[in-house]
Amino acid sequence: MRASVTEISVFTAAAAHVLCFAGFAVAHSIAGRGALVSDPARALRLLVVCEAPVVIAVFSYLRRDPKSCSFSKAAARGLIGLPVGAFLNAFGAIVLGAPVGIKYLMVTIYWSLLVSLFTFVPAACVFGASKIDWQNVLSHSIYFTPTEVENYMISAPCHGAVLGAWLGAWPLPLDWERPWQEWPICVTYGAVAGHLVGMAVSPVLIAVHKRRVRAKAD
C-alpha cells in the first residue's frame, strides 16, 4: 500500500481539484449562461465531454501504487467505471422517482455519466477493484477515523455530489411551474454545487489529517 500521507500534499490535492474545476469552467464558457435550463441535454453533454478526460487523467496520475499500476491501466479502470457508475446512478435515480420515457432518455444518460464522474470514476482510477478502499470511500466514518489522503480527496466531493443531488431533487414535485424544476436541471445544480463544496473541503480535511499524524508522531 502506498504511503499516501507523505506523497500527496495539500497543494497536490488542491491542484487536482483546480484542474477538475477547470473542466467545469470550459464547459460553462462553451455552453453559455443558462444553457442547463434552455438546453439541458447539450449542457450536460458538454460537461461530460469536458470533465471526463480531466477527471480520468488527474486521478489516474494519483493512482495508488504507481509502480505496479501504470497510468494507462488506471485510466482504463476509469473508462470502465464511467458507464458502470452511470448505470447505477440512473437506476438509483429512477427508483427514487426520476421520470422515464423517450423524452428524458438522453438527459438521464448524460446526467448519470456526469454524476459517475463525481462519484465512481475517481475511486476506480485510484483504487481499482479494492473492496476495502471502496468501503472506506463510500462510508461517512472516514471523517471520524484515521484514513488515507486519497480517501478525503475522493470521498468529500463524492458525498457532496450525492447530498447535493438529493437536496436538489426537493423542488421537483412542487407546483411552482418553473423551467428549472424539470428533470434533471435542479438535481444537476445540486450535484454540481455539492461536488464543488466537497472539492473545497477536501484539502482542509487533508491538512487536518496531516497535522494529526504529525502530532501523533511527536
Image (tube, rainbow, N blue to C red):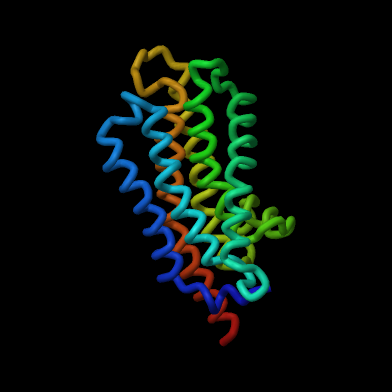
Q: How many marks?
A: 0
User: For the point 63% across and 35% down, which residue is it?
Assistant: 87
Say above or below: 119 vs 63: above
Residue 99: give x, y in percent of width and height.
Answer: 54, 18
Q: Quadrant of the C terminus?
A: bottom right
Say above or below: 158 vs 182: below
User: For the point 48% across and 54% down, which residue is it?
Assistant: 55
Residue 95: image quadrant is top right
Furthest residue in direction right, as rendered? 131
Residue 143 visible within the image: no
Furthest residue in direction bottom, as rendered? 218
Say above or below: 10 vs 120: below
Residue 5 visible within the image: yes
Q: Quadrant of the N terminus?
A: bottom right
Furthest residue in direction front, as rendered? 72
Residue 130: give x, y in percent of width and height.
Answer: 72, 59
Pick the residue in front: 43 or 95. 43
Residue 100: give x, y in percent of width and height.
Answer: 57, 18
In the picture, measured across the screen, residue 190 lies left or right of residue 120, that is left
User: For the point 56% across and 47% down, which residue is it?
Assistant: 119
Residue 189: image quadrant is top left
Residue 85: give x, y in percent of width and height.
Answer: 61, 42
Pick the residue in front: 170 or 62. 62
